[in-house]
Amino acid sequence: DRNLWYALNNLGKNSYHTEALAAMAHYKSEKRTMRPIPVPKIDEAVNVLIEHLESDRARPIPELLYSKKKEGKKIAGIMKPLGSN
């Protein structure tokens, strides 16, 4: 399970994969209270994501240049973002 791998891979780290952010926020809440919490505690993860997206550090995902793609054919390799040569 890929999502479980992200969460387990983040144990002991100070920064987390975005995919595991909610799981790690809940885990940290359980560690702070030293007891299981049956309801997901992801407020911290949501707040961090909102803070990041509103900051100057956030970058948009570049558009891909699909015009080079031929009808019905796949292009080998990685498609380049618009504006790159």
Image (spheres, helix red, strand yellow):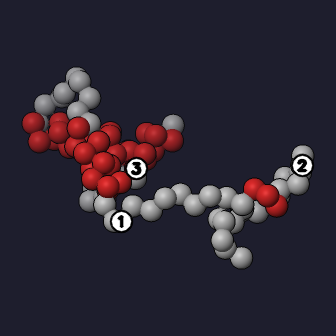
CA distance separating discs 1 and 2: 37 Å
Return the disc, 3 or 1, that comes first in the chain's sequence. 3
Residue 46, percent across and down? 29, 42
Q: Residue at x 34, y 46 (%)?
A: 21
Looking at the rendered structure, which numbered label has been put on residue 18?
3
Q: Is residue 13 above or below residue 28?
A: below
Q: Which residue is mark 2?
A: 71
Relative depth, front residue between 4 and 56: 56
Judge depth for marks 3 and 2 and give the one in front: 2
Where's residue 28, x and y in %? 20, 43
Marks counted in the figure total: 3
Furthest residue toward bottom: 85
Q: Which residue is mark 1?
A: 57
Residue shown at 88% from the left, 54% from the top: 70
Point out the frontmost of discs 3 and 1. 1
Question: Which disc, if any, is residue 45?
Answer: none
Element marked by disc 3? helix
Amino acid type, label 1 = Arg
Q: Residue at x 22, y 23 (%)?
A: 38
Name the residue at 84% across, 52% down.
74
User: How far across and down, in percent of the image, does residue 30 sit?
Assistant: 17, 36
